[in-house]
Image (cartoon, grey):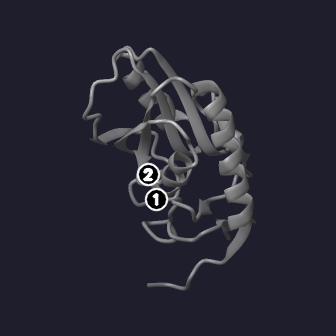
């Protein structure tokens, strides 16, 4: 294996924790008296989803889907594959998709279209990070953690070839 990439901290653990609490507060306001299903996109969203769901004070169901558009590269191929589809019915349910990053928007847009066809009562998106400079498909983010620069990011679930997901902060790879 070659040399380790140089990482620069973009958001500290404390900044992420504070933002997750703010997102949870906003979600609690909109979903009080509802029992939504949270759908996380694997693998990147699992840490964010765990922290977010623990900050909610109402019953939620947790579900995951796994999509891929990266392969082993650091840039999206634009070709989306469903690796693990939805396993529970969402018709008539309030659904909140939890995403680690919206980059080109192609994967997120694909998933939202896939879920809309299953006729949920409502469908919203919570994204920890958004990279608007790379957008190729329009995506409405209802709850946004951070807008980020057009750099490759790792940490807090985000990876480079399955590495660095476990970092408590979000870093850019130089």
SS type, badge 2? loop
User: Residue 72 versus residue 171: which sits nearer the camera?
Assistant: 171
Q: Which mark is residue 32?
A: none
- Identified at 40% across, 60% down, the residue is 72
- Identified at 44% across, 14% down, the residue is 121
Where, by quadrant of the figure, is residue 126 drawn?
Answer: top right
Please provide percent x and percent y for residue 77. Answer: 45, 46
Horizontal side of residue 87 vs 166, given as left or right? left
| Residue topped by disc 1 | 73
Where, by quadrant of the figure, is residue 124 drawn?
Answer: top right
User: Residue 15 versus residue 131: which sits nearer the camera?
Assistant: 15
Please provide percent x and percent y for residue 134. Answer: 65, 41
- Identified at 63% across, 25% down, the residue is 30
Q: Are marks 1 and 2 in contact (CB under 8 Å)?
A: yes
In the displayed structure, would residue 88 be above or below residue 42?
A: above
Give the alpha-carbon distance from disc 1 to disc 2, as whole Å: 6 Å
User: Residue 171 versus residue 123: which sits nearer the camera?
Assistant: 123
SS type, badge 1? loop
Q: Is residue 138 visible?
A: no
User: Residue 25 versus residue 174: which sits nearer the camera?
Assistant: 25
Quadrant for the N terminus, please: bottom left
In the displayed structure, would residue 84 be above or below residue 109?
A: below
- Mark 2: few, some, or many residues within 10 Å (few <14, many ≥20)? some
| Residue topped by disc 2 | 70
Residue most extreme to the left: 87
Please provide percent x and percent y for residue 57. Answer: 55, 40
């Amino acid at each position: 294996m070659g040399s380790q990439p140089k990482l620069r901290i973009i958001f500290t653990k404390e900044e992420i924790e504070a933002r997750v609490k703010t997102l949870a507060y906003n979600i609690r306001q909109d979903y009080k008296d509802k029992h939504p299903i949270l759908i996380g996109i694997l693998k990147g969203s699992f840490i964010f989803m765990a922290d977010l769901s623990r900050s909610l004070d109402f019953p939620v169901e947790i579900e995951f889907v796994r999509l891929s558009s990266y392969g082993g590269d650091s840039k999206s191929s634009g070709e989306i594959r469903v690796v693990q589809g939805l396993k529970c019915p969402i018709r008539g349910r309030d659904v909140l998709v939890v995403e680690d990053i919206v980059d080109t928007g192609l994967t997120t847009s694909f998933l939202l279209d896939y879920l809309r066809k299953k006729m949920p009562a409502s469908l919203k998106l919570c994204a920890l990070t958004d990279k608007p400079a790379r957008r190729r498909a329009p995506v409405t983010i209802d709850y946004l953690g951070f807008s980020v620069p057009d750099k490759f990011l790792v940490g807090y679930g985000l990876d480079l070839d399955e590495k660095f997901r476990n970092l408590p902060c979000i870093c850019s790879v130089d």
